[in-house]
Every structure is written in structure tokens, then in C-alpha cells.
Image (cartoon, helix red, strand yellow):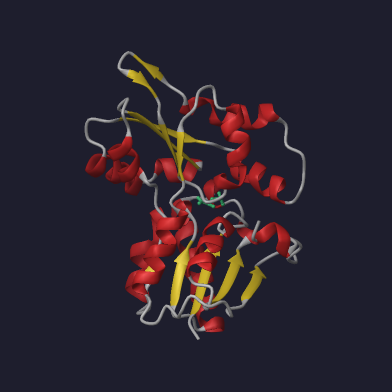
Amino acid sequence: MTRILVVDSGYGGLTVLREIRALLPAADLIYLADDAAFPYGDWEETALTAHIIETVSGAIADHAPDCVVIACNTASTLVLPGLRARFALPVVGTVPAIKPAAAATRSGSISVLATPGTVKRDYTRALIEEFAPGTDVTLVGAPHLANLAERHLHGEPIADTAISDEIAPCFVERPAGRTDHVVLACTHFPLLRKAMNRLAPWPVTWIDPAPAIARRVEQVLDDPGDRAAGGQVFLRTSGAAWTLPESAIFN
Ligand code: DGL
């Protein structure tokens, strides 16, 4: 039985877990919400690197997975090389989908909506240089959006203005045209997609890389299993007890 370990700082990585589950229903999935350390977006880089390496090492020792998915941009843009150097098993990351956004834009203006940590990363700048030359890229580090997404997932009502304030800097009017693609560069943000769509000052295409990550997981596995269901999902946290009902996980 194939086992896949999926790790995020909290519940945002569930947006990736859902896609892996849909594509590989025969695999066992272990989801680790490192909620004791949430939000990763506020951490200093050296401390976060050490913390993630320790956390993932412990989870690999506990669960012996065939593949690890870092379902978090804030972590992936920092620790993928370190994790890959340390472990022989495949490590799939989640990094800002700048390449498809730059390829698809018609106005030449895209935005990257991420945590404050991800927008500061050299990794993110390098993606822009490599894949978006000639495109106007607005980097938006949203300080509260991951937290709002967690609260929304747990059923708390979230004021529209709180979401609008976070996404507003993504919408830029330039003489050549206005923003037409927004990269969801934090796995929490697709949890708020309906509200973001409704509150957007004009329609844009939101790019969620989760389905592509699931396909990448399938590629790196020696035995991805068949399409029949049968895999189990194990939910773990590093802090508070898991309270989210299953209906909210796969919804
Ligand atoms: N889900 C994480 C990401 O994709 C970020 C949330 C956090 O700040 O911990 O970046």
C-alpha cells in the first residue's frame, strides 16, 4: 500500500490533500497539520528551516511514507533543497505558480497572493526572473488571510471587509491593462475562493496549483496504485486535538 505524508502549518494543505485523494484513492494519506507552529508566514527563515526539517524528519520516522508532500508555499520556498538532500524518498513541494500565470496572462499583469514569508523569499524572486520576464508581477504578502481561511474552515463567519482588505493590493490598473491572473501562492487561500471571487473588484483567474501537485505526486511514486478507492486518511496535529469533521475536509 502506498503511503503519502502531506504536511502544512495548519489546515490549508487540505486543499492539496483533496486533490491527491481524488487522483490516488487507493493510497493511504497521512496529513500532518503543524498547528503548534502556525503561521509559518511569520517565522524567521533560519528558525523555520530548522523547525520544518525536525518536524518532517520525525513524521517520516513515525509513518515511513513513500513520498512527502510539503503542502505549503511558505515552507517549500525555503526548505525543499534541504529536505531533498537529507532524505532519499521523493519530496514534492508547493511553490508559487508564476510560470502558468505568466504564460496565460493577456494583460501582462499578474499578482502573486502569498504569506509575508513567501513574498520575501529569494526562491520566489528567482521564479519571477526565470518565468515571467516582461510580465508585471505584483507580490502581495497578505498578513491575515491564512488565519481567516482557517477560521472560515472551522465555520466561523468572516467579515467581507477583512477578506477584501487582504486581496485589494492584487488588483492593479496599468496603462497596458489590469491584473487578469492571481496566483494563490498559499495553500490556505483556495479555502476562501468563493468569497474572493465575489469580492474581487473585477473578474480574474485564480490559479490554484493543487491539481498539478497531485499529478506530480503520481509521477514520482513507483507504485501509485489503481484508481479504486480503499486508501485511508490519517489526520495528525502537532498542537491542539483535531476537531475538523470529515465532511469539512473533503468538501
Ligand atoms: N499554507 C501555507 C502556505 O502555503 C501558509 C500558512 C502559514 O503562514 O502558516 O504558504
Quadrant of the image containing the C terminus: bottom right
Q: Is residue 220 above or below residue 209?
A: below
Q: What residue lies at 42% left-to-right and 78% top-to-bottom?
A: 224
Q: What residue lies at 57% left-to-right and 37% top-to-bottom?
A: 143
Q: Nearer the viewer, residue 66 or 206?
A: 206
Q: What residue lies at 33% left-to-right and 46% top-to-bottom?
A: 122
Q: Nearer the viewer, residue 238 or 89?
A: 89
* Identity of the residue furthest to the front in this view: 228
* Identity of the residue furthest to the top in this view: 175
Q: What residue lies at 65% left-to-right and 71% top-to-bottom?
A: 236
Query: To which quarter of the image does residue 82 belong?
Result: bottom left
Residue 149 visible? The answer is yes
Q: Nearer the viewer, residue 61 or 106?
A: 106
Q: Is residue 175 above or below residue 66?
A: above
Q: Image check: 74 left or right of 177?
A: right
**Exactly how many numbered labels are in the figure?**
0
Q: Is residue 57 above or below residue 144?
A: below
Q: Nearer the viewer, residue 75 or 66?
A: 66
Residue 144 visible? The answer is no
Q: Position of residue 182 (x, y in %)?
A: 44, 35
Q: Position of residue 80 (x, y in %)?
A: 37, 62
Q: Position of residue 109 (x, y in %)?
A: 34, 27
Q: Position of residue 212 (x, y in %)?
A: 40, 57
